[in-house]
Amino acid sequence: MNRFQQEVDATVDALLLQQVILYPTDTVWGLGCDAEALPAVEKLYQLKGREAGKPSIVLVADRAMLARYAAEVPAGLDAALAAQTRPTTYLLPASRAVAPALVGPDGTVGLRIVHDEFCFKMVRRLGHGVVSTSANKPGQPAPAVYGDLDPDLLRGADYVANWRRDDATRVAPSRVVRLGPGGALEVVRE
């Protein structure tokens, strides 16, 4: 087994134990956990210092997994997915499969289909969504590279992925959009 697969397996093992992970996402370094495990979500929020009622993104592997967490998939979603040119999170009505802490006050959940190989394999092997919130304390910048990580979060995470730690590529957080009537995109965060 190669090092990449070993790291995917180790990360998924931590998720199956309902642990909080620190990992490279398709955008910035993130804190994550099983999106269906409420105790893990609460632990993640406590570690990050995130206020209750402020939802986090859920990474999914494909449209079918996205549909598991969306109570309704808008007609324009397929066209929006086909046209996207960068990681994009879609705010969609949340289904009951989502831990309540991940649902916004308006009843939506942020869902992003990942294309990064590590994240895709991790989510696919787990078999359901993984929480993704930037690995920073509130008010601090999102860590684009491993060296930017807050030492308290490094110590507080149950598992720190040993993948892309030496990658110096800086990518912005995902774009966040809502799909309006007729499939029109409303940009919430560029």
Image (cartoon, rainbow, N blue to C red):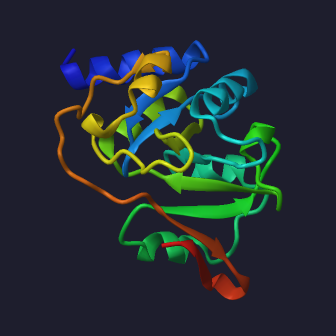
Is residue 74 toward the left or the right of residue 170 in the image?
A: right
Q: Is residue 125 above or below residue 142?
A: above
Residue 107 lies in quadrant = bottom right
The structure residue drawn at horizontal position 36% and vertical position 60%, both measured from the top left corner, is 172
Query: Does residue 63 appear in the picture of this structure?
Result: no
- Residue 34 percent location from the top left of the image: 61, 29
Q: In this view, does 42 lie above or below 144?
A: above
Is residue 112 toward the left or the right of residue 97 in the image?
A: left
- Camera-side residue of 56 and 136: 136
Tally of marks: 0
Q: Name the quarter where the N terminus is drawn.
A: top left
The structure residue drawn at horizontal position 30% and vertical position 57%, both measured from the top left corner, is 171
- Camera-side residue of 159 and 181: 159
- Residue 72 percent location from the top left of the image: 77, 62
- Outermost front residue: 139
- Residue 60 percent location from the top left of the image: 54, 45
- Residue 106 percent location from the top left of the image: 82, 62
The structure residue drawn at horizontal position 57% and vertical position 29%, both measured from the top left corner, is 33
Q: In this view, does 31 lie above or below 15?
A: below
Query: Does residue 162 appear in the picture of this structure?
Result: yes
Residue 89 lies in quadrant = bottom right
The structure residue drawn at horizontal position 43% and vertical position 17%, both measured from the top left corner, is 155
